[in-house]
Amino acid sequence: MLTPHDIAKMLDHSTLQPYLTPDEIRHGAMVALKYDVASMCARPCDVPLMAELLKGSDVRVCTVIGFPHGDHETAIKVQEADLALKEGCEELDMVINIGRLIAGDDAYVQNEIAQIVSLAHEHGAIVKVIIETCYLTDEQKVRACKLSEAAGADFVKTSTGYGSKGCTIEDLRLMRASVSPTVRVKGSGGIRDLDTVLKARAVGASRCGVSATEKIMAEAEARYAAGQLEEVSAD
């Protein structure tokens, strides 16, 4: 049987909404620490505060790069990543240049990812590449995953949560099949309950980006207490 902690360590607690205040970021850190989630993912401006609040814990400090549209110039994304790493980030979730991928400019997409990955790895940090599946065909999703792996990415990730559609189990399954076992898969966007997390886990996702952490963990704890917190079928 799974434990609530198994679920918690799949969760990146997301605090990315544009209207959040510093006090709400502090509350987010309290939630992340309470459940000992994998990471807390906050906006770049919140990194110094988040790093201070999470210092000494097992909750990793995460932020987003080129968020949410991915269309910053590469040099700006690299500068954003560099500052975040210097301020204490341990994980970077970067958005690809979606338009360049759709246009077939694979060299641009791979080179941009590689620059950020190289910088992050120099700091001992990891990179999750957001491909924003809602705008892509299946062929483009596969290509984005393969370019991410070729560039050295640690994860491929479905969505920002701010596109026209979020994570689907079908996309997670396709992405898992498109990269080698050394690259992990993260679902994000519209994951609001434990059952969806379990289904994502069943098709090979290692992480889920969620803002409904408290709800998901309450469900996990209740199901565990009843002896019913179990893996589900991938079918």
Image (cartoon, rainbow, N blue to C red):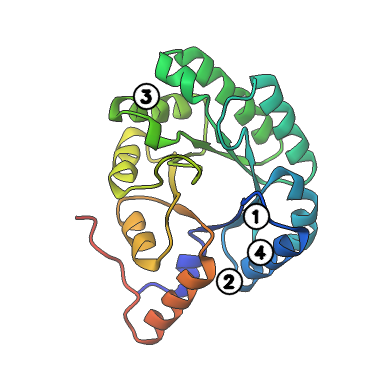
Residue annotated with mark 4: 28
* Amino acid type at image mark 3: Arg
Q: CA distance from mark 3 to mark 4?
A: 35 Å
Residue annotated with mark 1: 60
Foreground tag (3 vs 4): 4
Q: Is residue 35 above or below residue 190?
A: below
Q: Position of residue 72 (x, y in %)?
A: 63, 24
| Callouts 2 and 4 close, C-beta under 8 Å | no
Foreground tag (2 vs 4): 4
* Amino acid type at image mark 1: Arg
Q: Report the side of 44 relative to 107 (left or right).
A: right
Q: CA distance from mark 2 to mark 4?
A: 11 Å
Q: CA distance from mark 1 to mark 3?
A: 29 Å
Quadrant placement of the N terminus: bottom left
N-terminal label among 4 and 1: 4
| Callouts 2 and 1 close, C-beta under 8 Å | no
| Callouts 1 and 3 close, C-beta under 8 Å | no
N-terminal label among 3 and 4: 4
Q: Report the side of 114 relative to 224 (left or right).
A: right
Residue annotated with mark 3: 143
SS for tag 2? helix
Q: CA distance from mark 4 to mark 1?
A: 13 Å
* Amino acid type at image mark 4: Gly
Q: Residue at 51% x, 64% y: name it.
A: 212
N-terminal label among 2 and 3: 2
| Callouts 3 and 4 close, C-beta under 8 Å | no
The dot on residue 35 is 2
N-terminal label among 2 and 4: 4
Residue 221 figure quarter: bottom left
> Which residue occupies the foreground of this view, 151 or 100?
100
